[in-house]
Amino acid sequence: MTGRHKPGRVLLVGAGPGDPDLITVRGAQALRSADVVVHDALAAEELLDLAPLEAERINVGKRGHDDPTRPQEETTALLLRLAQQGKTVVRLKGGDPFVFGRGAEEASALAEAGIPFEVVPGVSSVIGALAYAGIPITDRRYSASFAVVTGHKDPTRVTQETRWADLGRAADTLIILMGMRNLEGLVEKIIDGGLSPETPAAVVADGTLPSQRVVEAPLNQLAERVRAEGLGAPAVVVIGNVVKLRQRLNWIERRPLFGRRVLVTRTPEQASEWMEALRAAGAAPLLIPMIRIEAASDSGPLDAALDRLRGYDALLITSANAIRFLAARARERGVLLRDFGGSVVCVGPKSAEATLAEGLPVQTIPAERFDAEGMLDAIEKHFPPAGRRFLLPRAEAGRETLVDGLRAAGATVDAVTAYRTVAPDTDAAALCERLTAGRLDVLTFASPSAVRNFMALLDRAARRAVADCLVAAIGPTTAEALRKEGLEPDVVPERANAADLVAALVEACGAGGSS
């Protein structure tokens, strides 16, 4: 042993133009292997969740040349220092590392220092933002060539000068990145170079995101229109006849929830299906969990029930959490759930799916209502509860509807706590600011606990702002919890699943995107 540690490595990863789903497979793999993620402000937060929980995350704040927060030299020095400590470092950069991303500068410094590195290409906003706006870069009818330039002049290169007058005539399509600050002057130079003032042009701001906005105008009116609409960086400017195709090819803005900002209050483990369904409809989901799920503080009653598991006629599963915590405790005690010989009744498809994953066959699921009342109806239809013994593992503060109904029918019910919901650490000030600033359009809730914890965080102004939001509850129980807090839910889907929730939101909002 020499005492020398093995040097780390740096992966320069393109995060893509904004939509987290546009990360490459290799980029996602790199993030999952990271000890440290050094990221720009433009990188989607969802991508940071791909890194291990213990990985360090360092925001260097860069939003392109229009808004450099940290000097490039400091960022490069940080990469060198982390790699020399033997760490696997992912340098997550918006778009593609080698397209106006200064990735070559960072790679050069790594090469000079002898540090292993890898470049993982990303979808550049040149491609991604325009595709999401319905503007192709090339088209056989309109464009056989394109030029991509930066509208930002590097102050360290005083002799550098883009030949704007020539560019307008050099390619059929001209694309300008980081040009918002100097847009009016750039347009004047291009027109002075001979390009027609009537040439179709567009600016795509926040490209590929649900907040995407597009302004189209003849070239000589573009800067004025952009200023009137209040568009800012990050944005892509495109000039050329391909812009004419946008009216036919604009696909994403036609999605029914396009631009709607939707608060999701579920746990991260349970939120993914909702988030995916909302994104598919064009919405911008924001995950701020209002509950955290923990094992029961006192496992004694659950342990006792597991010890006499074979003495029960039926197992009642009212949530995916219930079976997950029941199975985890059974494994700890060496109890094999798959040996349970009684009937298994689940409240709905999701709990049934989780139960099957634990090796337990499911005999009964309600046909319509996925709640306690639906379970009671299903049990009474399939086997009489009188004289039977039921085990109900549930949350610490569960409803008594199912227990009372079965006992009234002559059954014995052991309701034991398998897990509990607690309020997570949440930035209440940031949440209240989002609400009062009007930066949330829809609030969604999947449990009474989430409703109560959410309302407890709000100040008076934020409570008033909630009235301007569409409020959705996943089912009747959650809807009743909202009413107890003084909120009448606007949306309660017939069935408690992501698809029905999104369909109900679409109906409530009206098709056609953001208002």
Image (cartoon, rainbow, N blue to C red):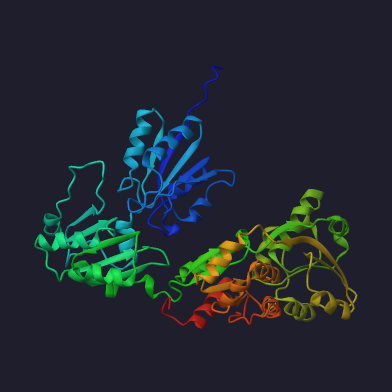
Residue 226 x %, y %: 29, 69
- The residue at the point 43 percent across, 52 percent down is 41
Q: In which quarter of the view is residue 201 placed? A: bottom left
Image vertical order of residue 323 relative to residue 473, above or below: above
- The residue at the point 41 percent across, 58 percent down is 18
Q: Nearer the viewer, residue 34 or 80?
A: 80
Residue 294 x %, y %: 73, 57
* Residue 210 falls left or right of residue 189: right
Residue 166 x %, y %: 11, 55
Q: Nearer the viewer, residue 212 or 344?
A: 212
- The residue at the point 63 percent across, 61 percent down is 267
* Residue 59 falls left or right of residue 478: left
Q: Nearer the viewer, residue 303 or 17?
A: 17
Residue 308 x %, y %: 88, 59
Q: Quadrant of the N terminus?
A: top right
Q: Which residue of the protein is positioned furthest toward the front in this rendering?
A: 460
Residue 288 visible at all: no
Residue 372 visible at all: yes
